[in-house]
Image (cartoon, grey):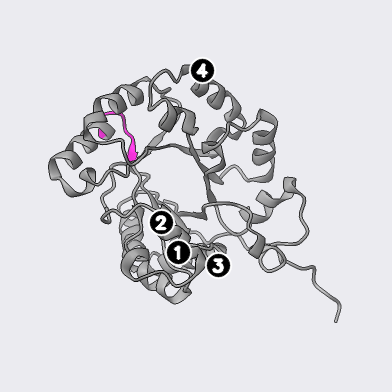
Amino acid sequence: MRLHVGCAMWTHPSWQGRYVPHPLPPGARLRAYAGWCNAVEGNTTFYATPSRSTVESWAEQTASDFRFVLKLPKSITHERRLAGFDEELGAFLAAIEPLESRTHALWVQLPGSFGPADLGTLAGFLRRLPKAHRYAVEVRHRAFFEEPGCERDLERVLAGVGAEWVPFDTTVFFRSRPASDAERDAWTKKPRVPRRSAALTDRPIIRYLGRDDTATTIEGWRHWAGKAAEWLREGRSPTVFVHTPDNAEALTLARRFHDEVRGRVPELDPLPEPEPAEPPTLF
């Protein structure tokens, strides 16, 4: 039984000098982040497959129980739409080998235009993937959330290969009009779909988007704190990623979420203690 928590990135300008030491060379930033959280979204892999040496650095900076949820390259999911992907997928899988068990799941994020008519393509794609990895799928077409038949069809496809459905819960974010530049930017980019709370596997993955106001974000995740505690009691090991539009406080919020769930499930192991952002002084 384990709860993994994390953010959408492992480095952010506003964290430097406040939560992690500054300056830090690129090869030490993930290590500092891993002192705060035990998982991270691998969003950078969506834009380009990293070099093997880069991934080796990621492995060196993290303990064996740290977890990455790595997004498949957009060339596979968005450009080729899960067809003719063999070369790109092979290069990606070879690059991430150094992470070994740190790869929690490979994340198939699909465009909003990928709908129920494309389920056959998704089913064929998932069946061809190597069994050495777990897979998690994020869909954004509203029919999967609003039409029970489409929802059941997608669940059957995912259950057939042991894949998880990754919901991106933006319901709290869209509850009121944006109040900052970061919120206005997110308002035009984030998916607006109903909340989904069902887990298909023993490793559910949740992406939660709050607001730049910390109190609103915390109040909005009460549902997920309860759901995570419920899953833990069932023997599942959930992963929860906390987002805010500017992500300035996401690092501390992720830890706070873990603490809140641990208050409900006391036997849950605590997170590691982060290193101080500044070295201690004598006076």
Q: Which residue carries the number 4 mark? A: 87
Mark 1 in CB contact with mark 2 (< 8 angstroms)? yes
Say which quarter of the image contains residue 24: bottom right
Mark closest to the chain's N terminus, 2 or 3: 2
Q: Which residues are magenta?
A: 159-164
Report the front residue among 269 and 28.
28
* Helix, strand or loop status at disc 3: loop
Say whether residue 156 is magenta.
no
In this picture, is 219 found above or below 95? Answer: below
Image x and y of residue 236, in percent:
35, 49
In space, the residues marked 1 and 2 are separated at their CA atoms by: 7 Å
Q: What amino acid is at disc 4?
A: Glu
Mark closest to the chain's N terminus, 1 or 4: 4
Q: Which mark is residue 184?
A: 1
Report the front residue among 255 and 74.
74
In space, the residues marked 4 and 2 are separated at their CA atoms by: 33 Å
In space, the residues marked 2 and 3 are separated at their CA atoms by: 21 Å
122 displayed left or right of 35: left
